[in-house]
Amino acid sequence: MTGEHTDVTERVIESMEQSAEVYGLSRSAGRVYGVLYFASEPLSIPELVERTGYAKSTISTVTRQLTRIGLIHRRSSRGGGRRVRFEAEHEIWFILQDVFQQYLQREMQSTLRTLRQAESDLEEEKNPNAQERIRNLRQTYEDLQVVVRLAAEFSPEELRNALEEYDS
């Protein structure tokens, strides 16, 4: 495993490996993204094989997956060659916004439907403890839905400015 990264960037890449699992990706996807993120130029599949130590089939699978979700981009080779090269998306905020919109919003809407139905069903029962807990949970999800919507609509700078203005 050769490449441009140092001990410091290797620690960051290892962290990206671990983070990838949180987002439902493989550790290998996190490593490939990390290697590309720190690369000074787009890399080909053979270069990624060399830098990660993964099999060509793993790199092919991972680059297809990362391209599909927008974490990396395909680039033509220098001089118009046939070899495809890959480059990391460095604007992570836009990817996170997409995740917020696609996955979190869908999960929260589903949970809110379930909670609203549970509130309705509990109106017939005499269980004030369960009613209060479900109501609190629904309110928390509704608040979280607003936060996620705001995060999906605004840049980090706009959110920071709004919070600073609110704070003063």
Image: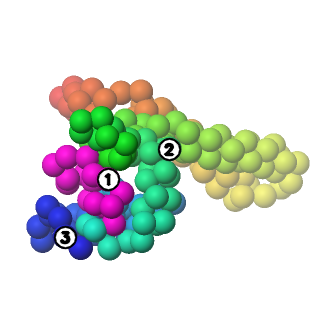
Residues packed near mark 2 inside 10 Å, few (<14), some (14 to 19) or many (20 plus): few
Distance between the alpha carbons at the discs numbered 2 and 3 = 27 Å
Q: Nearer the viewer, residue 22 or 17?
A: 17
Q: Secondary structure at mark 2?
A: helix
Three-letter code, disc 1 = Ser
Residue at mark 2? 68
In this rendering, the answer to whether 31 lies above or below 106 is below
Distance between the alpha carbons at the discs numbered 3 and 1 = 14 Å
Callout in the foreground (2, 3): 3
The answer to the question of whether label 1 and label 2 lie on touching residues, with beta carbons closer than 8 A, is: no
Three-letter code, disc 2 = Arg
> In the picture, which quadrant includes the N terminus?
bottom left
Left or right: residue 87 versus residue 152 is left
Left or right: residue 75 versus residue 160 is right
Q: Nearer the viewer, residue 78 or 59?
A: 78
Residue appearing at x 33%, y 66% in the figure: 49
Residue 64 percent coordinates (x, y): 49, 51
Residue 2 percent coordinates (x, y): 19, 70
Residue at mark 3? 2
Region rendered in magenta? 35-49
Give whichever of discs 3 and 1 has the lower sequence position: 3
Give whichever of discs 1 and 2 has the lower sequence position: 1
Residue appearing at x 20%, y 46% in the figure: 41
**What numbered label is drawn on residue 108?**
none
> In the picture, which quadrant includes the C terminus?
top left
Callout in the foreground (1, 2): 1
Three-letter code, disc 3 = Thr
Residue at mark 1? 44
Q: Secondary structure at mark 3?
A: loop
Give whichever of discs 2 and 3 has the lower sequence position: 3
